[in-house]
Each structure stands twice: as structure tokens, then as C-alpha cells.
Image (tube, rainbow, N blue to C red):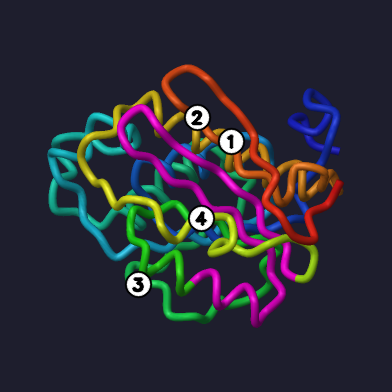
Amino acid sequence: MSIKSEIQGFDISGKSAVIIGCGGLGTNVSVHLAGAGVGRLLLIDYDTVEERNLNRQFFYTPADKGEEKARLLAGRLGAYAPEVEIKYQAGKFDNTIPGDCDILIVAVDNIATRRQANEFCKKSGIPCINGSINGFFGTAYLYIPGKTPDLEAAGCLNETENKNRSPSTTAAIIGALEAQLAVDYFLGIVQNAGKLYIYDNNEIHTLKIRGDSID
């Protein structure tokens, strides 16, 4: 058993996650999963670092402007958690995932990519966690194909796209919620699947989406 497992009281080193998006949400999701000792991470992002990102994307610095986010994040997470196998794909999500994947985590502000991930998970049966932020508002949702309503039914495909207005605090809260939902799923805790977590300016609520949600 690893030191992390002993300290935390659980072991997720045999689990893997794919994270689409290495921005404000993706940096937070990935650092929490790496810190919790997940076995494998694949980071997917086609974008490069811009100055407007730096208020909420804390793994990057002004010196990184123009560099590929996926490559930088993979390298810095590797230094933080060397026991985690971390790979990256500098490009758009192309409906394929190399190797095993226990869960797909969507951490983007692009509704088209969310829709694409939703359809991929429907067909593949891989669970999906979606996160979204807009100012001091954000949501997180775990979709388990065949057991809970999908992202469209949860309203995750109708949310406003927003790239600049959200502060680091909102990204941190929703990113951490996404990571916690993933850890719960890895540990067999699925009662929170099918519930839309809503953060609204210092208040957090849950909304159970009608359908075959898990009680």
C-alpha cells in the first residue's frame, strides 16, 4: 500500500481517467486526482496558454504564453505526483481513447465538445463527469450510461459558454467537485450519480434529474 493510500484510507491506484480540457476546471480536476493517487491520467487539450487564462489556471505562468497546455500540465503534474502515469494528447478529442479508461471527465467551455463526449459515453458505456462554470455559478454532474439520465437530460448541453469571466474560486470549487465525484465512483459510491450539483455564489444545491437516477 502506498503512503497516500495509508494516509487517505483508500486506494485508487488501479483506476484511470481521461480529462478533456486543461484549463481552469481541468487543472483543478487533474491535481486533485493525482494527489489522491489515481493510477493513470490522460490529458486532452488543443489550446495554448494565454494571459487571460492565468487568473484561474494556476499550473501556468506568464512565461508559458503560447505553449501547449496539455504538455505543460502533464509535465508539472508528473513532478507533483511521479507515481501517477500521466500522458497527454495535444489536440481535440477525436472520439477515441487509447487504452483503458474508467471515467471520462469533461472540463471545457465548449458545448460542442460536451455533446461529442456525451454521445461517445452513450455508445461506449464509459461514465462521464461534466463540469461547467460561468462567473460565480457552476455545475457538476456524473452520468452513468444505462443507469442515470445523460448530459442532455441534465441540462448540461444548454449552459452558456464562457471563457473569461469566471474567477479562480469558481473553477476550484467545481473542479474539486468533479474530482470528488470521480473518486466516489472509483470507490463504488454511486449515490451522487444522476444529481446535478449547482454552485451559486457561495451556496451549493443538488437537483435530482428525473429518470433512472440511482437512489
Q: Are marks 2 and 3 in contact (CB under 8 Å)?
A: no
Q: Callout 2: few (<14), some (14-19), or many (20+) C-alpha neighbours within 10 Å?
A: many
State left or right for residue 67 relative to residue 130.
left
Alpha carbon of mark 4 to alpha carbon of mark 3: how far?
23 Å
Picture disc at residue 92: 3
Q: Amino acid at mark 3?
A: Lys
- Quadrant housing residue 11: top right
Residues 189 and 83: in front is 189
Q: Residue at x 83, y 52 (%)?
A: 214
* Mark toward the start of the polypeptide (3 vs 1): 3
Q: Position of residue 74 (x, y in %)?
A: 43, 52
Q: Residue extending furthest top?
A: 202
Label 2 – label 3 distance at C-alpha: 28 Å
What residue does disc 2 label? Answer: 199
Task: Select label 2 or label 1 by which is in front.
Answer: 2
Q: Which residue is labeled 4 in the image? A: 155
SS at mark 3 in the image:
loop
Where are the magenta residues, as a range?
Answer: 117-145
The amino acid type, in three-letter code, at marker 2 is Tyr
Please provide percent x and percent y for residue 56: 30, 32
